[in-house]
Image: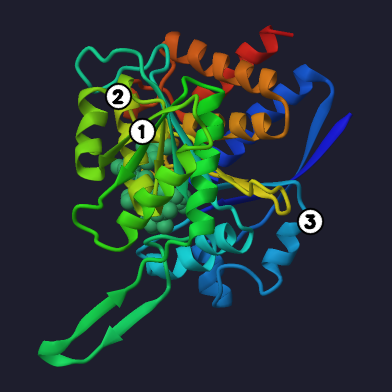
């Protein structure tokens, strides 16, 4: 019996609703399998915690998390309580960076039973591989001068090591898929980091001769994702470009509430963190309206990463069956609650035993 010790950080807003829902689904999947179980340890680190303690997590928070196999996180941020850059850099981004979760894998595909806002979309199935620890998300910079000369400067950091690492991950993933890698660039307008990004891409692609490649500027690529998402297999992107493309990926599936993600420590020296694309959705929090599918699909990605891909696929089947039965939350055109969707998925899984 494999027992996985998972650190759970529901976080803020709908994170507190969709995380318990996904844990129930994963427990049901584990029951069906019979050969694995989860031991969940929940940490109350969020904006409320910050208001009480002045930090988003205790000083030894990272050390505590190191003792777990993986981390399962909902969403962080309550901008009416704590400024976003404080809460996010104090928890989510801190964990990503300190645990070297340098690759963020974010699939987008047309699920059965889900209506895309695109008109007659061909079936698409793509994965954005987002650099997750450097790039435009840097803390180098500051505010200088005052008055009419006031300015803010933020330097982007692209290391050869980090850029190569995310690109190699993208190629290795593409080798197992349709062998096509698109690089998201902007070397026409950003004159240092993006020509460097292109150069590293040209160097790395030589090691993967079976893969076809193309580079698109991010602005054109964003438009292509709307016009012809079926043309893409793996897209490798910098931290900010990947962030933007993956909300778009969620949108073309039908809702950002469906989009899953995995922050991977590819070297497996630290836990990885499984956390969907969406945020804490303060506008719908606490009402039972949140779509749990993004968090549940994220749980499937955790199963895949831990070597239980068949079980992960069963979870995705259960999601699609639930959609096909019309049990959906409001963001995707249904009237069901978070718990009704979750219960239907669990019922489907139980019927498979
Ligand atoms: P958001 O993703 O929280 O919400 C954007 C829109 O999508 C909202 O209308 C929301 O209701 C809807 N939505 C999102 N998830 C949904 C779901 N599961 N079901 C149904 N509808 C859903 O983005 P935002 O409003 O820009 O951010 C809100 C807060 O979340 C901010 O503090 C932001 O910084 C934070 N945030 C955190 C994460 C994270 O922790 N991973 C990611 C994105 C945003
Ligand atoms: C995401 C989020 C975060 C990011 C924010 C909340 C810092 O948008 O995970 O996509 O930009 O990485
Ligand atoms: Mn985002």
Q: Secondary structure at mark 2?
A: helix
In primary-sequence order, the first of circles 1 and 2 is 2
Report if the CB atoms under discs 1 and 2 are less than 8 Å apart.
Answer: no
Q: Residue at x 39, y 65 (%)?
A: 84
Q: CA distance from mark 1 to mark 2?
A: 12 Å
Residue where numbered disc 2 is placed: 229
- State the image quarter where residue 303 is shown: top right
Return the residue found at the far bottom.
146
Q: Residues within 10 Å of mark 1 (few under 14, many from 20)?
A: many
Quadrant assignment for the N terminus: top right
Q: Is mark 2 within 8 Å of ligand 3?
A: no
> In the image shown, does 54 or 287 lie closer to the viewer?
54
Q: Position of residue 82 (x, y in %)?
A: 41, 69
Q: Secondary structure at mark 3?
A: loop
The numbered mark, 3 or 2, whose residue comes first in the sequence reads: 3
Q: Is residue 219 left or right of residue 313?
A: left
Q: Which mark is residue 67?
A: 3
Q: Earlier in the sequence, mark 1 or mark 3?
A: 3
The residue that disc 1 covers is: 250
Q: Residues within 10 Å of mark 3 (few under 14, many from 20)?
A: few
User: What percent of the width, then of the height, locates residue 108?
Assistant: 41, 28
User: In the picture, which quadrant includes the C terminus?
Assistant: top right
Residue 314, picture quadrant: top right
Q: Is residue 5 above or below residue 297?
A: below
Residue with the most extreme right position:
1
């Amino acid at each position: 019996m494999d027992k996985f010790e998972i650190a759970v950080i529901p976080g803020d807003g709908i994170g507190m609703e969709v995380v318990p829902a996904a844990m129930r689904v994963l427990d049901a999947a584990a029951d069906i399998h019979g050969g694995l179980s989860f031991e969940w340890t929940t940490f109350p680190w969020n904006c409320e915690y910050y208001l009480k303690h002045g930090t988003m997590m205790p000083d030894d928070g990272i050390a505590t998390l190191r003792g777990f196999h993986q981390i399962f996180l909902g969403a962080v941020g309550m901008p009416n309580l704590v400024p976003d850059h404080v809460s996010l850099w104090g928890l989510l981004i801190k964990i990503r960076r300190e645990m070297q979760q340098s690759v963020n894998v974010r699939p987008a595909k047309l699920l059965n039973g889900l209506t895309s806002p695109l008109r007659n979309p061909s079936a698409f199935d793509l994965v954005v591989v987002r650099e997750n620890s450097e790039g435009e998300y840097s803390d180098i910079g500051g505010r200088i001068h005052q008055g009419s000369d006031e300015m803010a400067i933020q330097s982007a950091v692209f290391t050869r090591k980090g850029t190569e690492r995310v690109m190699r991950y993208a190629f290795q993933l593409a080798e197992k898929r349709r062998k096509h890698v698109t690089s998201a660039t902007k070397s026409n307008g950003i004159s240092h980091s993006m020509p460097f990004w292109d150069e590293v891409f040209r160097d790395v692609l030589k090691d993967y001769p079976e893969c076809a490649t193309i580079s698109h500027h991010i602005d054109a690529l964003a438009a292509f994702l709307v016009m012809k998402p079926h043309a893409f297999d793996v897209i490798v992107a910098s931290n900010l470009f990947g962030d933007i493309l993956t909300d778009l990926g969620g949108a073309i599936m039908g809702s950002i509430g469906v989009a899953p993600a995995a922050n991977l420590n590819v070297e497996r020296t630290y836990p990885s963190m499984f956390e969907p694309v969406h945020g804490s959705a303060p506008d719908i929090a606490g009402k039972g309206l949140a779509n749990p599918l993004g968090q549940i699909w994220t749980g499937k990605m955790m199963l895949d990463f831990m070597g239980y891909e068949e079980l992960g696929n069963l979870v995705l089947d259960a999601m699609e069956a639930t959609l096909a039965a019309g049990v959906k939350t409001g963001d995707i055109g249904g009237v069901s609650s978070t718990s009704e969707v979750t219960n239907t998925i669990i019922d489907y899984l139980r019927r498979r035993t």
